[in-house]
Amino acid sequence: MHRPWKSLASALALGGVVAATLALAPPAASQSGSAVVTWFLGFNTTIPPFSDVLVRRAVATAIDRSQLAAAGNYRLATSLEPPGCIGHNPVARLHPYNPQLAKDLLTQSGIKPDEYGELGLWVISVLTRADVRKRELEILTANLRSLGLLVTVREFGNYDAFDRIAILPVVRMSYWGVRWTGAGCAQGTFLETLVHSKGEFNRFGYRNSEVDSLLDRARSASDRLTRTRLYNEAEQRVLDEAVIVPVWWDIR
């Protein structure tokens, strides 16, 4: 599997949340191909409230991805794998922005919005324009508060600080991004790195034996069509469970 970075710390540039995390620290693009970035919202699936798929779907449905993408003049992501990557799915099904449905899903979960108190929105305040970061935070906090969730923004000044807390229970949601060169994206996928139970950057506590099997089979498949089909199936399961919500792409 192609590894985009040696450590999570070098992979993060914007990011950290207790309730949500903004992170993106892509390295410079190599000369072997263009750079591709997927920015997404992810959840710690091991602890409440986001161990409940209904709560994850509620937040996924409350997030206005179009506004978030427009804040930085980015391309709205319609799948986790960006165009040009071997696992790209042009017909992936994402949870649509629907504030009323989001509230209904949260009600179905039985969880009260203020049950977990203040959820901190932690941000690493580097490598993004301050005006774009400010606008994204305004949109995110408004989306989360529309569900009645209590949100407080805190910022980190470096990657290592988030890396040290990324897998701790205090991080309930994460909003960050990963970047590969075009050459690397043609060889492997974001999925293997992010959602395989042994994925190097799986900071969601996500464990699904069926998804692991699909990814393992895709990696060992001899033809591209089979690999793509298996990757697409794995991604759709992850999207249906709202483990990760793709927000925008930056393709250079």
Image (cartoon, grey):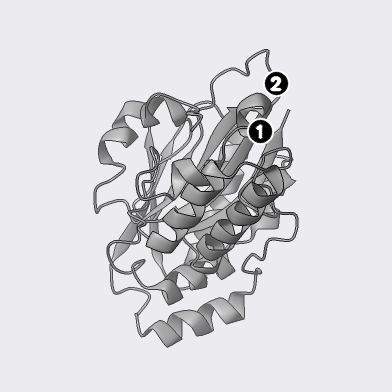
Q: Position of residue 125 (x, y in %)?
A: 46, 32
Q: Helix or strand or loop: what does disc 1 sit on?
A: loop
Residue 169 image label: none
Q: Please tell me how crowded label 1 is: few (under 14), some (14-19), or many (20+) other residues with Cα within 10 Å.
A: some
Residue at figure coordinates x 38%, y 45% from the top left: 202
Q: Quadrant of residue 210?
A: bottom left
Q: Amino acid at mark 2?
A: Gly
Residue at figure coordinates x 32%, y 34% from the top left: 163
Residue, disc 2: 33
In this view of the protein, can residue 139 be seen by the observer? Answer: no
Rendered position, 143 above or below 104: above
Q: Helix or strand or loop: what does disc 2 sit on?
A: loop
Rendered position, 122 above or below 145: above
Q: Position of residue 98 (x, y in %)?
A: 64, 74
Residue, disc 1: 186
Looking at the image, which residue sits at the far top? 31
Tell me: 235 left or right of 205. Answer: right
Q: Amino acid at mark 1?
A: Ala
Q: Position of residue 252 (x, y in %)?
A: 73, 27
Tell me: 227 left or right of 192. Answer: right
Q: Are marks 1 and 2 in contact (CB under 8 Å)?
A: yes
Tell me: 101 left or right of 211. Answer: right
Q: Pick whichever of labels 1 and 2 is earlier in the sequence.
A: 2
